[in-house]
Image (spheres, helix red, strand yellow):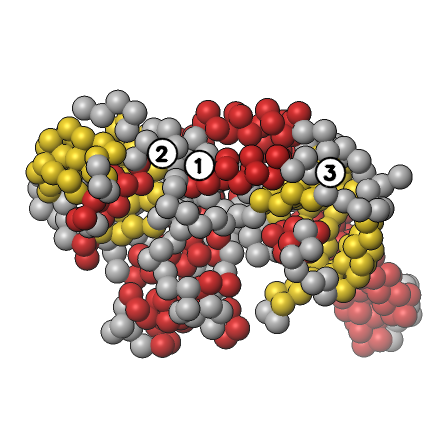
């Protein structure tokens, strides 16, 4: 007997259609991975299952009383993001839930805590519904996938690796069919050309015979036209098959990358170090890190590493210009106006602003048309979208908006603190495409090893063993 039945669930917003008429069951002990692009309703679906959001359409029917644990994406605390996530997970598991709902729990976690999370979830005996963009976690923990795409939710029974393998097989089979169909279309086109040429020659011979008062020994025009029409119909049928096949290919293809026209060229800078710290210390009332010696030259890319709570975010906030965190030493940094900074909580974005107002706060001299065009380049398109409040955006959308604001006033130094958190696979690829050719100076905090490798980091500085 299933623990939970979903019947005809639908979710939409004024400018977004998420999914329609989703029906399935959650079985006892099932571990489900919920995947899809940002803004497709994954967090909302978890909130509905947790009883924190009303069901728009359809029914959620539990089989008796269920104990539910829910860890949402966002947490509010002065502690590090990783510590907050692990604390929230401990509290949820302490209640021994039968159904555990986790919304991107791997965000902010260092490698040690990611491994702990993976072990705990793999060993969890209850039913799990997990939203994550981490392929490794999906593969290790989940036996079923719910894929949100194109206004539907598809259920796949198997691991994430099985899903990718099946997608690849489907693509291969469809591409083979597409190649064969292309050859058929070419043959049909050539046949049509030959029929039309024969018809044209026949008409010429017929006209000549009439002129010379001879009986034309040729096919009748009606018969020729029927041949041309038949070939044309065959060609049109092949074109329709081609359209259907293209749609099928798109359905099983990895999401198409929508590359916006946004660039982050470095501003001209003077020679010499961009950042230089000597005997520096950072912290609040007491130092978290001290005796810091750090130099970063023009165009270099540095990763700041360390365990959760080791002081990484405190250090980059001090570099950004929060002078109250500088507890001593010599500091050489660019002026605050020449530093771009995206933090874990997107604190630089006013949640009461609309998307359009957030950009205009960055570039008050731009006219509304220029602002809208710039936002469209970052995939914020349409009146409803640009008038959304920042506080109502998903984590990935806020990151994209923060990048749009930075690109409007190009920074000399770019500081990114766990910027891949909340981003779906498509947006991670977008982010890599933007930052890979960026010629400015970059400081990065990230536990996403694939992302770090793609950015071509040139040096690393550890908070665990500063020198």
Residue at the spot of label 3 = 98
Tell me whether the residue at label 3 lies in contact with that at label 2, contact meaning CB atoms closer than 8 angstroms: no
Residue at the spot of label 2 = 309
Q: Earlier in the sequence, mark 2 or mark 1?
A: 1
Q: Looking at the image, which is closer to me, 364 or 327?
A: 327
Tell me whether the residue at label 2 lies in contact with that at label 1, contact meaning CB atoms closer than 8 angstroms: yes
Is 111 on the left or on the right of 170, as rendered?
Answer: left
Q: Looking at the image, which is closer to me, 61 or 68?
A: 68
Residue at the spot of label 1 = 83
Q: Position of residue 53 (x, y in %)?
A: 66, 60
Is 286 on the left or on the right of 79, as rendered?
Answer: left
Q: Residue at x 56, y 48 (%)?
A: 72
Q: Is residue 186 visible?
A: no
Q: Is residue 164 above or below residue 369?
A: above
Q: Secondary structure at mark 2?
A: loop
Q: Position of residue 330 (x, y in %)?
A: 8, 38
Q: Marks 3 and 2, Cα distance to the nearest angstrom?
A: 31 Å
Q: Marks 2 and 1, Cα distance to the nearest angstrom?
A: 7 Å
Q: Marks 3 and 1, Cα distance to the nearest angstrom?
A: 24 Å
Q: Residue at x 44, y 36 (%)?
A: 83
Is 75 on the left or on the right of 231, as rendered?
Answer: left
């Amino acid at each position: 007997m299933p623990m939970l039945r979903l019947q005809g669930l639908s979710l939409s917003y004024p400018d977004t259609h998420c999914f329609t008429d989703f029906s399935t069951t959650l079985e006892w002990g099932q571990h489900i991975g919920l995947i899809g692009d940002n803004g497709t309703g994954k967090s909302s679906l978890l909130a509905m299952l947790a009883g924190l959001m009303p069901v728009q359409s359809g029914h959620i029917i539990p089989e008796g009383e269920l104990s539910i644990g829910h860890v949402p994406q966002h947490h509010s605390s002065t502690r590090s993001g990783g510590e907050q996530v692990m604390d929230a997970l401990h509290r949820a598991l302490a209640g021994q839930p039968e159904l555990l709902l986790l919304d991107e729990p791997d965000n902010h976690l260092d490698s040690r805590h990611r491994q702990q999370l993976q072990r705990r979830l793999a060993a969890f005996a209850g039913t799990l519904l997990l939203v994550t963009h981490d392929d490794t976690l999906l593969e290790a923990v989940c036996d079923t996938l719910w894929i949100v795409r194109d206004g539907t939710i598809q259920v796949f029974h198997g691991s994430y690796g099985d899903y990718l393998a099946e997608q690849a097989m489907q693509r291969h089979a469809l591409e083979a069919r597409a190649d064969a169909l292309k050859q058929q279309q070419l043959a049909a086109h050539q046949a049509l050309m030959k029929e039309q040429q024969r018809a044209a020659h026949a008409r010429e011979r017929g006209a000549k015979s009439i002129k010379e008062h001879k009986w034309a020994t040729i096919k009748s025009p009606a018969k020729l036209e029927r041949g041309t029409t038949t070939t044309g119909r065959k060609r049109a049928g092949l074109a329709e098959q081609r359209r259907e096949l293209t749609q099928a290919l798109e359905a099983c293809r990895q999401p198409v990358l929508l590359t916006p026209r946004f660039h982050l060229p470095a501003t001209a800078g003077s020679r010499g170090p961009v950042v230089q710290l000597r005997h520096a210390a950072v912290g609040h009332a007491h130092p978290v890190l001290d005796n810091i010696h750090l130099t970063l030259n023009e165009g270099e890319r540095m990763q700041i590493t360390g365990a959760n709570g080791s002081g990484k975010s405190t250090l980059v906030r001090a570099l950004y210009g929060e002078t109250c965190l500088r507890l001593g030493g010599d500091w050489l940094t660019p002026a605050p106006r020449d530093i771009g900074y995206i933090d874990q909580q997107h604190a630089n974005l006013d949640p009461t602003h609309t998307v359009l107002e957030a950009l205009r706060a960055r570039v008050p001299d731009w006219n509304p048309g220029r602002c809208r065009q710039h936002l469209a380049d970052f995939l914020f398109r349409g009146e409803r979208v640009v008038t959304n409040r920042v506080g109502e955006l998903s984590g990935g959308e806020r990151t994209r908006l923060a990048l749009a604001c930075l690109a409007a006033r190009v920074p000399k130094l770019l500081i990114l603190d766990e910027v891949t958190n909340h981003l779906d696979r498509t947006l991670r690829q977008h982010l890599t495409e933007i930052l890979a050719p960026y010629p400015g100076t970059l400081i990065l905090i990230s536990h996403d090893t694939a992302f770090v490798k793609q950015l071509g980091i040139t040096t690393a500085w550890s908070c665990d063993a500063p020198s």
